[in-house]
Image (spheres, coloured by chain):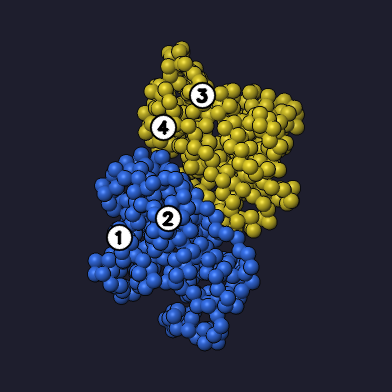
Chain colours: A blue, B yellow
Amino acid sequence: MSLLPPKPTTFVQPATLCRELGLDVTIAVEAFQYTGSFKYRATYNLVQSIDHPSVIAASSGNFGQAMAFACEQAGKPCTIVMPNTSSKVKVDAVRSYGAIADLIDTSQITREARVAQLAENAPEAYIASAYDDPLVIAGNASLGREIAASGVVYDFVLAPVGGGGLASGLIQAFRETRYSARVVGAEPALGNDAARTLAAGSIQVNDREPPTLADGARTRSIGRHNWAVLKDGIDSIIEVTEDQIREAVKLHFLKSNIKAEPTGCLTLGALLASPDRFRTSKILCVVSGGNVEPGLYASLIQD
Amino acid sequence: MSLLPPKPTTFVQPATLCRELGLDVTIAVEAFQYTGSFKYRATYNLVQSIDHPSVIAASSGNFGQAMAFACEQAGKPCTIVMPNTSSKVKVDAVRSYGAIADLIDTSQITREARVAQLAENAPEAYIASAYDDPLVIAGNASLGREIAASGVVYDFVLAPVGGGGLASGLIQAFRETRYSARVVGAEPALGNDAARTLAAGSIQVNDREPPTLADGARTRSIGRHNWAVLKDGIDSIIEVTEDQIREAVKLHFLKSNIKAEPTGCLTLGALLASPDRFRTSKILCVVSGGNVEPGLYASLIQD
């Protein structure tokens, strides 16, 4: 079984944005990765690593597409549990890679319960978490190795934080390669469990999925495997308001010519939240993906 | 005087787009170039090469911004003649680089006449054409050298054609480097003077500036210096309808995660116009720039 390896990230230096912000910012754009987000780094590694004949995962977003694409190449049946309110674009994307989009009414059954149901009928299947899995973290680490190998020494690397899969992958890679950049997480203020977790020293949980624009960060908490890496590895977490997420989408559109999804804009949002902290630093912001509904994007850039 | 050299182009391989089209397409994205389009390649070379103490140019678009940025670095006064109907974003961009935006009422005076007026009062100024100038062609050739040096042998390189500055630069570079790719021009069907020029063997002129969405190709004819290169160098010109331009903007948004301006989408539009011609070829499409008004872009992606 030979899957297409993840594409190298695309480093963009947005001169006009830097001028506007008065900051030295480079962007690692993962919107050009297979299936349009960094998630394929994880699913590539996971699907290459397992012997299980099939995969089940819950995802309404980028992880589902990335898993479907990896499984298609491996010839493994793949079922993605999605809310029946998921947009047609996302459901169609999963199906275009030959996966089953299992649409559920989340007022009737939780995603976890539905995954458990499916797993009971397919005990040989691998149940994949979008973040809380060492294979996912190891997959995401490939981005960190590329940053370390870029020859540029950044002071800070900013990554969106939902479940913590990307940030933990970066930290793991920087440890392996003895790369000195500090990893800063950018999290929606509406669901600030990671900031509270770091302050408390133990995993804190949001009461519900935070209704943030950053749909890739609508997680109730970071994962256990992720926390094991983050607790001694992450520099800090910056909370980003919804207005800052909106502003960041628009700034990437106007000043960087980067089409980024709201979750991917958390990192620029963090610079808007705390510009003075980064005034004399060399900064790398990860734009984690580019997949966003046209209607939502149109409203954000015209705000 | 030392200007920032143009940034290397960004090669993107849009796997989802290729799958959708059934074509082997790579994109050379110039939206991440300084000032957001390939035009800085030309103005960088021009401003480095001249001894004149100031520059005057007519441009409502990317050339004006790129010239203003080059002149700012060189410390040369720069005047950009623009219609007073130009969008605020474009006028502000020119002014942000310290240039004078000379706004005219085009119902009262043509751009050429206004440039002539200004030139009379500043006889020492360099009067810069956006395309019809060997220094512009030589500047644009840097993109062709990068393509030739990429190590990939494309069968066809598609470039937007307005005045012919980019296509002639590519051809000149491919000749210099003995690179075998054939250059195909992509032109709005609404202003098909380049196609008619190629058929007639002499420069043909549109009756008026064609009212195409591709505002970078609203030219009445290709330039003389450009035609001197194109006449024996260009493979063919593909005419692209307005609907195909719209579809291409939307496809780049949905399938490539590339924010491209309508003129930059002429090349994908050409693939939509003539897909079968390219079915077994290795194709490079140049996206010449990314600067587009939010309102227009929002309407195009939601079409």
In this view of the protein, which residue sits in the foreground, A35 or A75? A75
Please, is residue B233 above or below residue A216 in the view?
above
Residues at marks 4 and 1 on the same chain: no
Q: Residue at x 73, y 28 (%)?
A: B232
Q: Residue at x 38, y 35 (%)?
A: B92
Q: Nearer the viewer, mark 2 or mark 3?
A: 2
Residues at marks 3 and 4 on the same chain: yes
Q: Amino acid at mark 2?
A: Thr
- Crowd band around label 4 with a 10 angstrom C-alpha radius: few (<14), some (14–19), many (20+): many
Q: Position of residue B25 (x, y in %)?
A: 64, 50
Mark pair 1, 2: CA separation: 23 Å
Determine whether the residue tagged by mark 2 lies in a helix, strand or loop: helix
Q: Amino acid at mark 3?
A: Leu
- Crowd band around label 1 with a 10 angstrom C-alpha radius: few (<14), some (14–19), many (20+): many
Mark 1 highlights which residue? A237
Label at residue B46: 3
Q: Amino acid at mark 4?
A: Val
Q: Nearer the viewer, mark 1 or mark 3?
A: 1
Please, is residue A1 above or below residue B169 in the view?
below
Q: Nearer the viewer, mark 4 or mark 1?
A: 1
Q: Amino acid at mark 1?
A: Ile
Q: Position of residue B144 (x, y in %)?
A: 61, 35
Mark 4 highlights which residue? B94
Determine whether the residue tagged by mark 4 lies in a helix, strand or loop: helix
Q: Chain of mark 1?
A: A
